[in-house]
Image (cartoon, rainbow, N blue to C red):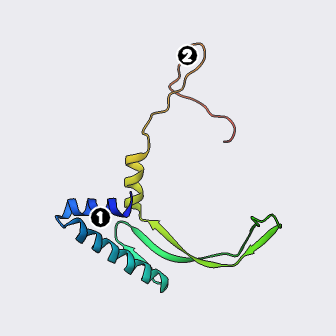
Amino acid sequence: MTREDLAREVALRTGLSRRDAGAVLDCILRVMEEKLCEGESIYLRGFGCFEAKPACRRRARDPRGEGLIDIPPRMRPVFRPYNRLRDAVHASLSPSARAVFVFPGGASASRVSVVGGF
């Protein structure tokens, strides 16, 4: 979904014009960007938390083929969904299939013993 798609959906659900919905969406995103750049966290109850977190210094392969390079530490934007959102996405997108055990020779089992580790 793109920004334009999101603005169109907001316009349909609120009765705002697409132009007004796009302006509101752009304003919200600008405010969020400004606050994250200032080091503030944004908490949206029932949805999740946007915050800037430090990323550690790391080593990576030099794309020019000159060995390894050090990437300095920096701040990264991070989104952490709250349980309600995580559970809703899981419930709507995860397959809810029941495990069925099939044995060659036609036998079936209602109980299975597992030996060893996974």
Residue at 83% x, 66% y is 67
Location of residue 116 by image quarter: top right
User: Which corner quadrant holds the C terminus?
Assistant: top right
Which three-letter amino acid code belongs to the residue tagged 1? Ala
Q: CA distance from mark 2 to mark 1?
A: 56 Å
* Residue furthest bottom as drawn: 38
Relative image position of residue 66 (x, y in whole percent): 83, 67
Tell me whether the residue at label 2 lies in contact with that at label 1, contact meaning CB atoms closer than 8 angstroms: no
* Residue furthest right as drawn: 67
Residue at 41% x, 65% y is 82
* Residue furthest left as drawn: 15
Q: Which residue is mark 1?
A: 7
Query: Going from the N terminus, do you reach mark 2 or mark 1 first?
Result: 1
Which three-letter amino acid code belongs to the residue tagged 2? Ala
Above or below, 109 relative to 60: above
- Give the camera-side residue of 98 and 54: 54
Residue at 77% x, 65% y is 64
Residue at 43% x, 78% y is 33
- Give the camera-side residue of 81 and 99: 81
Residue 37 is left or right of residue 6, and the answer is right
* Residue furthest top as drawn: 105
Q: Which residue is mark 2?
A: 107
Relative image position of residue 105 (x, y in whole percent): 59, 13
Question: Which secondary structure, mark 2?
Answer: loop
